[in-house]
Image (spheres, rainbow, N blue to C red):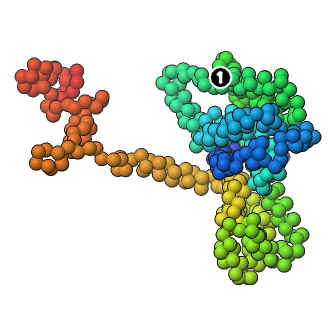
């Protein structure tokens, strides 16, 4: 009994003391924001047909559908062309800011608003990747996805360093952003734009009030207990959302695999052959012919796809087997992106799979990226300074402060090799008790 209670208390402490999976949630944040951003940029020339007034799904039809199902979309607040253009561009800007990790708590909410607004405007556009993006955009709001690999993490480190030096840094951007968004949310609520759906308006107000409470406690609390309590609540919410994301990914694969088993084409091992020869899913017909040239290969890929999708949820209890199947599924989605012309579906699924990536692998990946950035910023790759020529035509490097062999002081000024007195009458005599060449 004591051993059981110890395990339970340890599990509770693990869930409440820290936000688990910081690297995994950061990869999910980066993956889905990059997927949505690339989709918006690629479809920018076709935005009017997809979500604008020139689309086959007219504004009146979308208004009737949203009125019946209660979905949230800010695009139906106005039929103005300027409103559509502004919201489309804002959705792209919010994706960039979430990708960089700037004010991730606020940007995750705005990212969700952009995704829901565009997708619920034309529900018949897109593919299965849109459904995954739709769900994950909501789940990201509940996660602390900016703990690592974000501008928020860098700002937190600088704030801690400033406090260690005895300074008291003040954040003015956060309260200003909170006030502007709260004012806009209040206007939308009073104008009746939030009457159709109850979940999204409630979530928006809850996050807004939570941000206010977090700021007030950090600003006014004289003891650390209130902030510690808020940390515990936030960690519980984050870990619960992370568990939901993992369960969602397992449910997607399990459902897809079990439905495939019921299909006759998947049972006889020929299902992979047909989508590779459909005109809509064949951007590279020659590649499709090459992949389906061997009937044995088609059968192995067909049965292997079903086996991997059905077995993946059960392999989470074995780390090594899970990593092997995870690599196979990522490879499968990469092939789908190229062979079937579904890059955004594949990117969304790979981003969802990232929640199962090992932390050690993600840390090594982060170190490689850091070294690559340092190598790009290294002086070896910089353009050499301009050269000057004497009358003889021989190039002579232009003098610059800090070149090898030239002593430079702290502000970058050239110093003579030997200290000279101000009168210029030879070497200066060091003051008593001072070493030669040192400043008084």
* Location of residue 255 by image quarter: bottom right
In this rendered view, identify the residue nearer to me: 373 or 86. 86
The percent position of residue 404, horizontal first and vertical second, equals: 23, 43
* Residue drawn at x 12%, y 25% as measured from the top left: 420
The percent position of residue 308, horizontal first and vertical second, equals: 76, 67
In this rendered view, identify the residue nearer to me: 305 or 396. 396
The percent position of residue 394, horizontal first and vertical second, equals: 15, 50
Considering every residue shown, the one lying at the far front of the view is: 54
Q: Is residue 100 left or right of residue 409?
A: right
Q: Does residue 392 appear in this view?
A: yes
Q: How many labels does the image show?
A: 1
Q: How crowded is mark 1: few (under 14 residues within 10 Å), some or many (20 or more)?
A: few
* Residue drawn at x 53%, y 25% as measured from the top left: 163
Regarding mark 1 in the picture, which secondary structure is present there? helix
Considering every residue shown, the one lying at the far left of the view is: 425
In this rendered view, identify the residue nearer to me: 438 or 396. 396
The percent position of residue 369, horizontal first and vertical second, equals: 51, 51
Q: Does residue 203 appear in this view?
A: no
* Location of residue 119 by image quarter: top right
Q: In this view, does 381 lie to the left or right of 94?
A: left
* Residue drawn at x 63%, y 52% as measured from the top left: 359
Q: Is residue 71 left or right of residue 400?
A: right
Residue position marked by numbered label 1 in the rendering = 175
* Location of residue 183 by image quarter: top right
Q: Is residue 138 left or right of residue 20?
A: right
Q: In this view, does 333 lie above or below 18?
A: below
* Residue drawn at x 16%, y 20% as measured from the top left: 431
């Amino acid at each position: 009994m004591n051993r059981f209670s110890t395990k339970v208390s340890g599990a509770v402490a693990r869930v409440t003391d820290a936000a688990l999976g910081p690297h995994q949630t950061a990869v999910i944040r980066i993956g889905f924001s990059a997927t949505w951003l690339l989709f918006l940029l690629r479809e920018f020339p076709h935005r009017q047909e997809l979500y604008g007034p020139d689309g086959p799904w007219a504004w009146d039809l979308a208004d009737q559908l949203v009125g019946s199902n209660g979905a949230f979309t800010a695009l139906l607040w106005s039929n103005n062309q300027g409103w559509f253009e502004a919201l489309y561009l804002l959705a792209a800007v919010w994706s960039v800011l979430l990708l960089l990790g700037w004010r991730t708590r606020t940007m995750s909410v705005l990212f969700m608003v952009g995704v829901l607004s565009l997708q619920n405007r034309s529900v018949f556009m897109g593919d299965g990747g849109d459904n995954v993006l739709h769900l994950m955009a909501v789940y990201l709001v509940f996660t602390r996805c900016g703990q690592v690999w974000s501008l928020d993490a860098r700002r937190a480190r600088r704030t801690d360093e400033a406090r260690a030096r005895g300074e008291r840094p003040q954040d003015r951007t956060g309260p200003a952003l909170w006030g502007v968004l709260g004012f806009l949310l209040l206007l939308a609520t009073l104008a009746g734009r939030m009457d159709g759906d109850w979940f999204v308006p409630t979530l928006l107000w809850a996050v807004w009030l939570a941000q206010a409470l977090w700021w007030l406690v950090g600003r006014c609390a004289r003891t650390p207990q209130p902030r510690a309590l808020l940390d515990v609540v936030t960690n519980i919410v984050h870990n619960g959302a992370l568990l939901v994301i993992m369960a969602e990914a397992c449910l997607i694969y399990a459902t897809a695999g079990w439905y495939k088993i019921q299909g006759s084409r998947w049972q006889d091992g020929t299902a992979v052959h047909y989508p590779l020869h459909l005109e809509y899913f064949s951007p590279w017909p020659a590649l499709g012919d090459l992949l389906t040239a061997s009937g044995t290969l088609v059968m192995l890929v067909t049965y292997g796809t079903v086996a991997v999708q059905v077995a993946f949820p059960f392999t989470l209890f074995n780390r090594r087997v899970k990593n092997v199947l995870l690599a196979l599924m990522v490879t499968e989605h990469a092939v789908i992106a190229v062979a079937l012309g579904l890059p955004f579906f594949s990117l969304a699924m790979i981003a969802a799979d990232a929640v199962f990536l090992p932390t050690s692998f993600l840390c090594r990946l982060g170190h490689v990226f850091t070294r690559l950035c340092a190598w790009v910023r290294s002086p070896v790759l910089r353009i050499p300074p301009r050269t000057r020529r004497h009358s003889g035509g021989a190039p002579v490097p232009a003098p610059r402060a800090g070149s090898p062999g030239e002593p430079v002081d702290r502000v970058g000024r050239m110093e003579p090799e030997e200290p000279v007195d101000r009168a210029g009458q030879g070497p200066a005599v060091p003051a008593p008790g001072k070493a030669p060449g040192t400043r008084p």
